[in-house]
Image (cartoon, grey):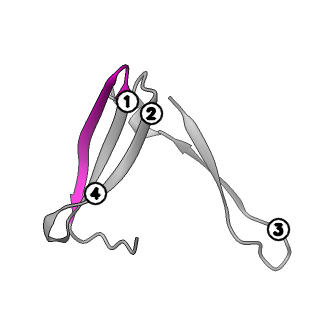
């Protein structure tokens, strides 16, 4: 599975917009969990005591698979 999106910054004074293309996944493509999946996303969930958990969510065949990837209490998110 491979997807991409483009990020456009605000135009600078010359009127030229900077373009950046991001490819996903990179390192994640080698994971067995991600191979041959239909939908794959990272979700941030707020846990108790201000901790945030980053979860890898995958729909593979007819199964929903969720794996905790990263937990950090110091992540500052304004959303």
Which quadrant holds residue 50? bottom left
- Residue 6, compared with residue 25, is above or below; it is below
Residue linked to disc 4: 45
The circle drawn on residue 59 is 1
Q: Which residue is mark 3?
A: 16
Of pointers 3 and 4, the one earlier in the residue sequence = 3
Is residue 62 or residue 32 the one in the foreground?
62
- Assign a secondary structure to mark 3: loop
Q: Is residue 9 magenta?
A: no
| Mark with earlier residue (2, 3) | 3
Q: Which region of the structure is painted magenta?
A: 59-72
Q: Are the two marked residues, 3 and 4, in contact with CB atoms closer than 8 angstroms? A: no
Q: What secondary structure prevails in the magenta region?
A: strand
The dot on residue 75 is: none
Q: Earlier in the sequence, mark 1 or mark 2?
A: 2
User: Which mark identifies residue 39?
Assistant: 2
């Amino acid at each position: 599975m491979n997807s991409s999106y483009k990020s456009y910054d605000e135009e600078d004074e010359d009127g030229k917009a900077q373009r950046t293309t991001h490819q996903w996944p990179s390192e994640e493509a080698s994971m067995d969990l991600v191979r041959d999946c239909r939908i794959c996303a990272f979700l941030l969930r707020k846990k108790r005591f201000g901790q945030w958990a980053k979860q890898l969510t995958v729909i593979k065949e007819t199964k929903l698979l969720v794996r905790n990837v990263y937990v950090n209490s110091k992540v500052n998110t304004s959303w």
